[in-house]
Structure formats: structure tokens, C-alpha cells
Amino acid sequence: MDRIFLSLKDVALKLGVSEKTIYRMVSDNQIPFAIKIGGQWRFKTDEIIGWINSQKAANSAPQPTIDYRISLAAALANGAVLYRIHGNNRDEIIDELLAALPYSSTFDANTVKVSILARESLVSSSLDGIAYMTTAGSLPVFFEKTMVLMAFLEKPVDFKALDSRSAEAIFLVLPANTIEQEILDRKLRRLSMSPRFLTGIHQQMTRKLLLDFIAQTEKEIFD
């Protein structure tokens, strides 16, 4: 090994894997900073050491606890139920929703809004007068815990829904991780197929009645 480059064997020792594994990773473009010198793989020392340290840090970081049985009612209890939300368009309403979130040093409203709109730009999540919003997988934003904001709008607003019906209510899923986000997304899709659920949401119940109603509906459908 010289001062400028590390050999394939050196990198294998530092990562604690076999040379064959490193060769495969290079062939699959899973490891950066690899160049061939005289027919042998070499790695620029400064860059590869920094990459190795970042991999070790990522592997040693505590993994988030995932609630595979997370319910919409529980996530809504973590979030908020909002009434008479103002706004003449989708952008203004999202601003109002995010302004209702509790302060967090890691929370950037603009970043979250861009992620939400990136997903909504593909196709509106609004159907039957209810929008089911969340952040985009291509621009992930995660919170300390998964929460849902439920908002009733002061007046119906055109969200460019496929059924052309203006939105009157919104579910906004703000996830702590991708798995809980996907679980809630699928639960909301299933709930949106229930006429009883749709009718109940449009009644704009008080927060307690709404949480009880959603919890009971989830129990009937998913249990």
C-alpha cells in the first residue's frame, strides 16, 4: 500500500469482508473511488477512507422503531384535527396545515411542502371530496414520530381531482419512516372505499367523536 492509494485487499480488511466481496461491490458499482492501475483495482486513500467511515457510522446508528400495527387513529392522536382551514388553493391550504405543526428544530416547512406537492403533481390524491396527502418517496421527509393531520376546509377547494369534486377535507400523513407511511397509505385507500367512512368524515365530527369513529371503523375493517 502506498500513501495515495489503497489496494483491494486493504479495503477488504478495513470493511471486514472478503476480497471477493469487494471485487463484486466494485463490479456492481456499489463502492466508489475505484480505478484500475496496471490491471489492479486501487482506491484513492482520502476518499475511500471517508466513505468507509460513513458506512460504519450508518451501520452503527440506532435503527428507528417501526410500528407494524400503526393505526390511523393513533397517528391522528399524535397529530391534530383542524377546522375551518382557510385557503383559495392547494398551496395556501398546505401552508396553513404545516403552520399548525408543533415547532421542531429539524422541521422545515418549505422542504415538507415541496415533497407533498411533488407527489400531488403526479395525480391529485383527492377523491369523493377528501384528499389523502403525504410526502413523496422521491423526496423523503421524516419526523420523530408518524402523525396525521386531519383538516376540514372552510370552503370546498379545487384540487384537480379525477372525479372533479372539490376537496372539503384532508388527511395529511407525515411519516417517521417509509414503512409506517406505506401502512397508513394503504389503510386510507381501503377506508376510502367504505361509504360509511366517507359519510362519517363529511359530517365534520368533534375531535373526540372523530377519533372514536375512525378507531371503530378501522377495527371493523382490519381486525
Image (tube, grey):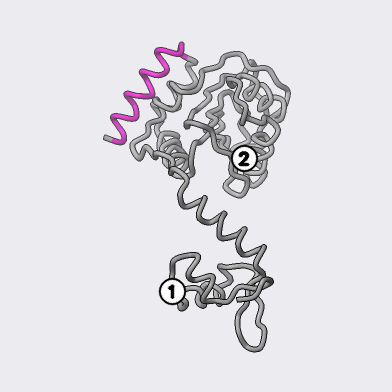
Using the image as rendered, state which of residue 114 and residue 40 is in the foreground.
40
Residue closer to the observer: 69 or 24 = 24
Could you tell me which residue is drawn at 60 percent across and 59 percent down?
A: 51
Does label 2 or label 1 sit earlier along the sequence?
1
> Within 10 angstroms of label 1, few (less than 14), some, or many (20 or more) residues?
some
- Residue at far bottom of view: 38
Amino acid type of the residue that numbered disc 1 sits on in the rendered structure: Ser
Label 1, on which residue? Answer: 18
* Residue topped by disc 2: 124
Which quadrant holds the C terminus? top left
Q: Position of residue 85 (x, y in %)?
A: 63, 17
Q: Position of residue 153 (x, y in %)?
A: 61, 19
Q: CA distance from mark 2 to mark 1?
A: 49 Å
Q: Report x, y in % for residue 128.
A: 53, 32
- Between residue 165 and residue 200, name the one nearer to us: 200
Q: Residue at x 59, y 22 (%)?
A: 101
Q: Position of residue 135 (x, y in %)?
A: 58, 39
- Span shown in magenta: 205-222
Q: Secondary structure at mark 2?
A: loop
For the N terminus, which image quadrant?
Answer: bottom right
Q: Was residue 175 drawn as part of the magenta stretch in this picture? A: no
Q: Is residue 212 magenta?
A: yes
